[in-house]
Image (spheres, rainbow, N blue to C red):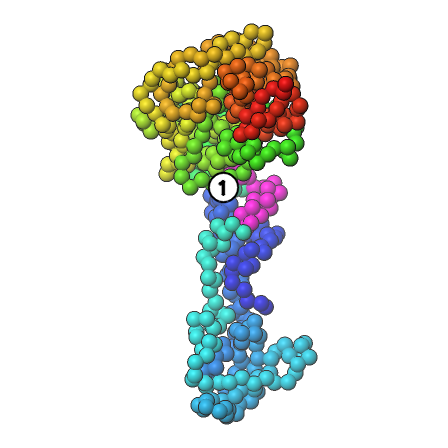
Amino acid sequence: MTLLPAQHWAYSFSIGAEDIDSITNLLLEKEMPLSSVELATAIIRLREENIKLQLEQQYEGTKIYQPCGSFAVGDRLTFAQMNYRTATIVGLRDGKYKNVGPFKVAAVAFDDAASLSDARPREFATEYNGEHPLNNPDTNHHPGNSHSEFTVEDIVNAPEVTIIQQVNDALEKNPDLVRIAGTWFVRELMQEVDIGHMHLSEAVLDMHGGGPMGPDEILEQIGGLGDSPNPLQVFSLNYAMNRDERFDEVGPAGVILWHLTRLLPRMVRQVPKILQYLPVEYDRSLLRNEMLQLEYDLDDEHSPLKSAPPDDEVSITLTYPHRRVGTLPINSETRHVFPDAKTPRIAITIIDTLDKEEYPCWVVHRFKYVYGLAALYQKHHLPVGAYVYLNRTGDPSRFEIEFDNYRPRTEWIPVVESTKKDQLHFGTAKRAIGADYDDMIIVGVNVLSEVDRLGKDVQNKQLPLAKLLRSLISELSKQNPQKSVHAKVLYSTINILRRCPPGPICATLVANPEFEYVGGNYWKLSE
């Protein structure tokens, strides 16, 4: 048997039928739900115990070979430097070597010599008291006393190890077991949850604004499910609520929270039209380096970007669609910040660092937005283009938001004044602004209802991107003596009418002869 530290076999781990039986027996014995991590840990411990028992049996009666050791004919040895091969001493003699003190030489016959066609005894020095790495008991020890360099927790949590996933995959195929939020139990031992318990749970959530509430709190309000242990009651209630469409699970990964489906905010159950992006096919090879840099700087949630997890706060520039409906984008950076889960919606809290007011918000990963900040934007007079900063807290469901605020002051900004002839027409107007902003993204709207109507028409008619860009450049270039418009301005204004990341915008500008590039991401209409 080859001796390997525990982490080696863990990395090549494969779960088998015996492991499934062990897990089932453990759940029956405990009569308590156990997490995937707990079950994986139990399997590893069992494997370690089996390996240790096998090693003890295989190397019983052997001594570890060390050059300083004193042995007799007939002693059985194991050699760490030779992958723990075993042998029997068949002869001893005095050894002689120039400038080396007295020592002996042991002739040994290896147990596997015949299979290796090497039946001749081999000789090894013994009773040698000089320096030698094999004389170190810390690095050269008997296999029966071997210990892994890593704990079981190290093995389970190692990123290269897939034991937990294998446990989940294997147990999913067992109809006798049930999983809720990474916790498993035997189906036939679950606590009964009847329709009365479900009605009471609904009433409790209704009295608390729909939720979110944890299962422990709900159980306390409804009087529990009997005398069984609380973890089993929690598991059984979660399982029943998960199968009832009246309830929506909204907790981050590893945390179960329940909310009444019918009382979820409308913009959480249904994606706002203004945030819906109909993907545009385009050739990314057309994008020049400065355009790719602009795409990276804007970090639109629909751009094909990847970013490393941020070390500290994340900066976001509010675009018109998100400012309009009170959302934040889940882009290449913020996706590392907001909690993930298999559920379609996650309840979180965002805290205003200025006055500590808390806002219940919702993470909608599938459609890449976080909803619930309209009141905060309005309170602080945040304009389109405002720089917003997001910070984590010690709680994965709570975040802090801040911005470069100042006392609201009146400033001249570009605004949409009308939508004559189904086109946006721009001017300037005074607005109360309460935070620093990107002056190429900022834009106001005087006629919200008209703009909303035009935006719906644009989406319903699926007007070509080139047509919208032509109209915007024609209108916006009136304010520039060079008759040119920056791509960032086009990005900001086109998203008033339809959702679109900068990649397709820049590619359309490059590919269409109606548009002329004048450098620095500035464009004008061809003459």
Q: Which residue corresponds to the image point at 34% horizontal and 25% vertical from the top-left?
A: 405
Q: Residue at x 59, y 44 (%)?
A: 169
Residue identifier under label 1: 308
Residue 200 at what x, y percent from top left?
44, 23
Above or below, 294 against 465 in this view is below
Name the residue rendered at 63%, 20% in the picture.
526
Q: Which percent across, then down, holds residue 228? A: 43, 38
Q: Residue at 43% of width from left, 84% of height from top?
A: 129
Mark 1: amino acid? Ala
Residue 133 appears in the figure: yes
Quarter of the image with the C terminus is: top right
Q: Note whether residue 234 is visible.
A: no
Q: Observer-nearest residue: 328 or 503?
A: 503
Helix, strand or loop for disc 1: loop
Instruction: Give yes or no for residue 2 being in the magenta stretch.
Output: no
Please identify the residue farthest to the top as the structure is shown.
Answer: 420
Task: Check residue 177 for magenta coloring.
Answer: yes
Q: 169 or 376, which is in the foreground?
A: 376
Q: Nearer the viewer, residue 35 or 284?
A: 284
Query: In the image, is residue 481 above or below residue 15?
Result: above
Q: How many numbered discs?
A: 1
Q: Looking at the picture, how far across and down is residue 332, in whole percent?
A: 51, 35
x, y percent for residue 116: 67, 77
| Quadrant position of the N terminus in the picture | bottom right
| 30 sits to left or right of 527 | left
Q: Is residue 376 above or below residue 21?
A: above
Provide the residue span drawn in magenta.
Answer: 162-182
Answer with left or right where residue 283 lies relative to residue 262.
right
Compared with 243, 190 (above or below) is below
